[in-house]
Amino acid sequence: MASREVGVSVFLLLVAALAAGANAMPDREAYHPPRFHLPRLDDHADDVLRALEREGMLLVTGAPGLEEARTEALLGLEECARSGNGDHVRVASLSGGVVRQTIATKSSSGLPPEVESQCPGFAGRAQALRSATREVTRRVVRALDRGMGAGEGDHQGGCNGAGVLGSV
């Protein structure tokens, strides 16, 4: 199976809204955020900084293992949502007969204990996805540090990636 480029965007809701807006307004050109290839991210630190200043988001491609982790996490999420076990799945009826099932969680602290116990397959897959996206985030912060003038091990004048990454 050929590896597809996978993009990571911090603003998932914004991307979804943009995609929905593109479908609603066919006469408008689709928006594409600035794109950077992960293995070459450090070579484009100034461009990464400018992209975030100008656009507020960027797309990172070429993250090893991210596509597989994303696919596996989504499959695990579907299994968990369909299981119907316990109170971990929130169900909402939307207009047009659409039923939305949601598993609410905080990215910084993992899954709630009830989801981990009732959906262990999803819990492990979600952790793999978090690990993959955390590595991409670390690389973006490192590029930002460099773009703001901080060198390797020198965070004066940069965004102090070490402090930022403590919360990632």
Image (cartoon, rainbow, N blue to C red):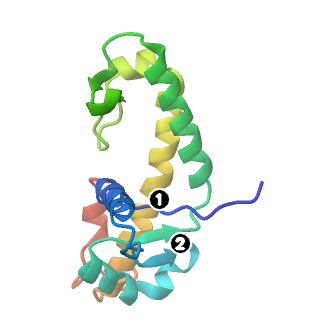
Residue at 47%, 39% in the rendered image: 127
Q: Residues within 10 Å of mark 2 (few under 14, many from 20)?
A: some
Amino acid beneath label 1: Glu
Q: Which of the two labelled residues, at mark 2 and mark 1, occupies the earlier sequence position?
A: 2
Q: Which mark is residue 28?
A: none
Residue 6, image x, y percentages: 55, 61
Residue ID at (32%, 83%)? 49
Between disc 2 and disc 1, the foreground one is 2
Callout 1: helix, strand or loop?
helix
Q: Is residue 70 visible?
A: yes
- In the image, residue 45 sits, relative to residue 22, either above or below, namely below
Identify the residue position indicated by label 2 in the image: 38
State the SS at label 2: helix
Q: How many marks?
A: 2
Left or right of residue 130, residue 94 in this image: left
Residue occupying the point 47% across, 77% down: 35
Viewer-proximal residue among 130 and 18: 18
Residue 5 point in image, percent of width and height: 60, 65
**Residue highlighted by disc 1:** 135
Q: Quadrant of residue 133?
A: bottom left
Q: Position of residue 101 (x, y in %)?
A: 36, 27
Which one is in front, 44 or 23? 23
